[in-house]
Image (cartoon, helix red, strand yellow):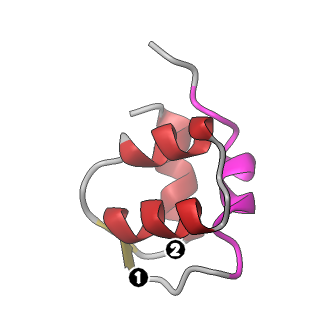
Amino acid sequence: MTQQPDPLHVQEFLTGIIDYPVSKEQLVRNAEQAGADDEVLRALRTLPDRTYDGADAVSAEVAQGT
């Protein structure tokens, strides 16, 4: 299993560009547009397909290493 990136590293590419609530697809799309690296994009793509109500919810999922 690939190690997940630090949730704070993921948030670097989402802070200020995401209006929550947001879908997984929107998270990935916005991170791509912000220039997220492959590690961050891989982590976001492996998240459960649901609506996220805030940065804490995204960070919690990333930290779990889904």
**Residue beneath the point at 38% across and 46% down:** 45
Q: Is residue 15 magenta?
A: yes
**Residue beneath the point at 57% across and 62% down:** 31
Question: Could you tell me how many numbered marks the image carries?
Answer: 2
Proximity of marks 2 and 1: CB atoms separated by less than 8 Å? yes
Name the spot of residue 2 as percent of width and height, x first.
Answer: 51, 17
Please give the residue where the numbered disc 1 appears in the rendered image.
21
Identify residue type, mark 1: Pro
Name the spot of residue 60 as percent of width and height, x first.
Answer: 52, 50
Q: Give residue 54's mark.
A: 2
Ranked by sequence position, the earlier of labels 2 and 1 is 1
Q: Is residue 27 above or below residue 59?
A: below
Quarter residue 56 falls in: bottom right
**Residue beneath the point at 70% across and 73% down:** 15
Q: Is residue 25 above or below residue 60?
A: below
Mark 2 vs mark 1, CA separation in Å: 6 Å
Identify residue type, mark 2: Gly
Closer to the camera in the image, 33 or 47: 33
- Quarter in which the N terminus is drawn: top left
Element at label 1: loop
Name the spot of residue 57 as percent of width and height, x first.
Answer: 48, 61
